[in-house]
Image: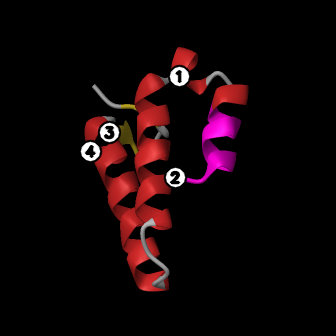
Amino acid sequence: MRCEIASELDDLHVNETSPGMAAVARDLAKAIDATDAPTAKAVAAREAVRADVTAHPFDAQTDSPGP
């Protein structure tokens, strides 16, 4: 993983306020760094977002967490 991303997460204290999102960001950074292929990077980003949305669904009408 790129040091800049880890450093930025540390500077923002993301692990303290949102450890789950920090983990998603770190996993995404690792997946993107693992390849030079643009399509693979796009797939990694899509899957990271999909996993987060699946874990934390929201109401599309109100843009707020669902029931």
Nearest to the observer: residue 14 or residue 63? 14
Secondary structure predominantly adopted by residues drawn in magenta: helix
Residue at image mark 2: 1
- Whether residues under marks 2 and 4 lie with C-beta atoms below 8 angstroms apart, the answer is no
Mark 4, residue position: 54
Question: Is residue 41 left or right of 55 when viewed as pictured?
Answer: right
Highlighted range, magenta: 1-9
Q: In the rendered structure, which amino acid carries the disc numbered 4?
A: Thr
Q: Amino acid at mark 1?
A: Asn
**Circle number at residue 15:** 1
Which sits earlier in the primary sequence, circle 4 or circle 1? Answer: 1
Horizontally, is 62 left or right of 48 in the view? right
The CA distance from mark 3 to mark 1 is 21 Å
Q: Is tag 2's residue or tag 1's residue first in the polypeptide sequence?
A: 2
Select label 2 or label 1 by which is in front. Answer: 2
Q: Are marks 4 and 1 in contact (CB under 8 Å)?
A: no
